[in-house]
Amino acid sequence: MATVKSLLTNALSYSGLRPPADVSAEFMYRFYTPDETVSEQTGNEPGASARYVKVNFTQGESYATSSIKISDIDITKVHTIEDIVNMRCTYITSQNTGIFNRTSDAIQRSCRMRGITGNSTDKAEKLGRTLSPAVNREILQDLAVNSDRSGLTQFANGSVISDISKYDDVTGVPARGNFYDKFIGDICQNAEMQSPYRAPVELGLIAKYLLDRQREERNIAPNISAGDFTSFLEPIATEESTSADFGYKLIGYLIDRVEEFSSGKREIRTIGRSSQTNLSFVDYEIKYGARYSYTVRTIFEATLPQIITGRADPIVSTVLISSAPSNIASVVAEELVPPPPPTDVSFSFDHTRGELVIRWEFPVNPQQDVTRFQLFRRRSIAESFILLKEFDFDRSSSPVIRSDAPLPINIIKSNFPVRRFIDHDFGRSSDYIYALCSVDAHGLVSNYSTQFRVTFNRRLNTIIVKSISSSGAPRSYPNLYLNNPDSLTLDSISGRGPTRMRIVFDPEYHDVTASGFNLELLKFIENDAKYFVNVIDTDRAEQVSVPISIISGSI
């Protein structure tokens, strides 16, 4: 039989080839390594890898399964929707992953235009009155909170929870389209200019590439031709058959990853394969701090008839075809959990030298990423802690830049962990409170350790160590967990339901004099003095400070 060149027919339906759904990506940080900015394959099991991203997905449609293994295919032979529709088009999937930040910014601009002020709750309530009744007030409230969350106070657990997370499904909705290359750059630019918010990142990052592609296509052929819409598919096998089962069979899945660099450059590649029954993939080659976006494509074995000019023998071709990309699952490879504070804090007094020796141990920390310790001291619970020293034994090749780094004079650097310090200021008449914090390789700082009051008993000629606070007090609220809170005069009240608050200013003394002179301890509006009432909404983790001025002569 003579060999005759043949082309596949155009009788190919692509609409039934569904991409995977519900794609999600989760970054897992297991333990610290000195150089976390380099991709590394530390093992082929999650338990052996320092960090990894796990991608999960579902396959909404049911398909017959192919006998071809996903591990055996040549991915260069896989045809995409661009190949099927035509050779002069580009298929784009755009996903507005930053929709809530952009919407929150729009809410803030809207409030400024209307002169609306206050905390996020007030802004949402006042703005809602000016909008259509169709606007969901609960969503508006959550968006307003989202816009203010960068300024919220961190409470004891070191985190702030925003209700915005319950709308994560919205950010996972992709917009897909197939665009003619000779117009694709103009379409992209117009889409950016027509956007009511900032241009979506997914379009902005590829805009230059699309413009270059449009320019190249127009240089090759400035006019539109029928040849631009002709498809050619290369089969992986052909055979004569009179009873072929035409259609699609599921082979497996390809996982694609986009790594985004601070320069705006993107690296796009296929990083893995999953079998028909394995609806997950683990990416071990992760750089700490990098941003990754994942999509998953379903790979099919397509059995199609061929038309050969001049002969009627039935010829069947097998072609590898992928679905459109799934929704985009983005993740930033960053750990956001602060380390635990140091443990086993102990004190001893060197009678020979008259010095206090402080010792401590590493906390139980599976990540093993504690690279610094901070030692604090204060004279009483009425004072704030003062940093005595930070002990820096960070071995990271690229140490994190910290905005709250102490002055160099307060830092002791070493090549090994330091768990001991001598306080030369402590004497036989001293009375100090001590606490420690852990700092990890990513600049996250723990809450305070157990706080100890240390005094010297001259009669017994020894130090007296007393625990005055359990571990875990936030750095901004060191007295939160005092063992004897009654020893404090708490400047706070709590309650539920009240809508009005009456404040009474009732000092014990109006005037305090020394050597015949009035010390003028009370300040009034004439002195440009203000007092503040700090109101904290513990349900939403929000706070607002209300300024109060007092007129002299009113008390």
Image (cartoon, rainbow, N blue to C red):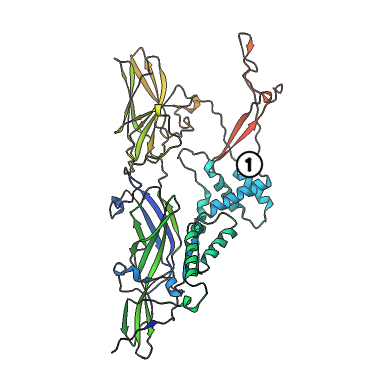
Taking the image as drawn, is residue 125 in sight? no
Quadrant position of the N terminus in the picture: bottom left
Which of these two is toward me, 538 or 511? 511
Residue at the outermost top position: 515
- Locate residue 277: give its quadrant: bottom left
Q: Which residue is mark 1?
A: 118
Which of these two is toward me, 333 or 460? 333
Decide if residue 199 is on the left or right side of residue 430: right
Q: Residue at x 37, y 56 (%)?
A: 54
User: Residue 547 at what x, y percent from top left?
Assistant: 63, 32
Helix, strand or loop at disc 1?
loop
Q: How many marks?
A: 1
User: Residue 11 at what x, y percent from top left?
Assistant: 44, 81
| Relative vertical location of residue 352 with respect to residue 550 in this rendering, above or below | above
Q: Dot 1: within a 10 Å radius of its alpha carbon, few (fewer than 14), some, or many (20 or more) residues?
A: few
- Locate residue 400: give its quadrant: top left
Quadrant position of the C terminus in the picture: top right
Taking the image as drawn, is residue 122 in sight? yes
| Relative vertical location of residue 56 with respect to residue 118 in this rendering, above or below | below
Decide if residue 522 is on the left or right side of residue 173: right
User: Residue 100 at what x, y percent from top left?
Assistant: 54, 53
Q: Residue at x 34, y 57 (%)?
A: 282
Kind of residue sitting beneath label 1:
Gly
Residue at the outermost front position: 219
User: Residue 281 at what x, y percent from top left?
Assistant: 35, 59
Which of these two is toward me, 425 or 454? 425
Which of these two is toward me, 394 or 422? 394
| Relative vertical location of residue 536 with respect to residue 485 in this rendering, above or below | below
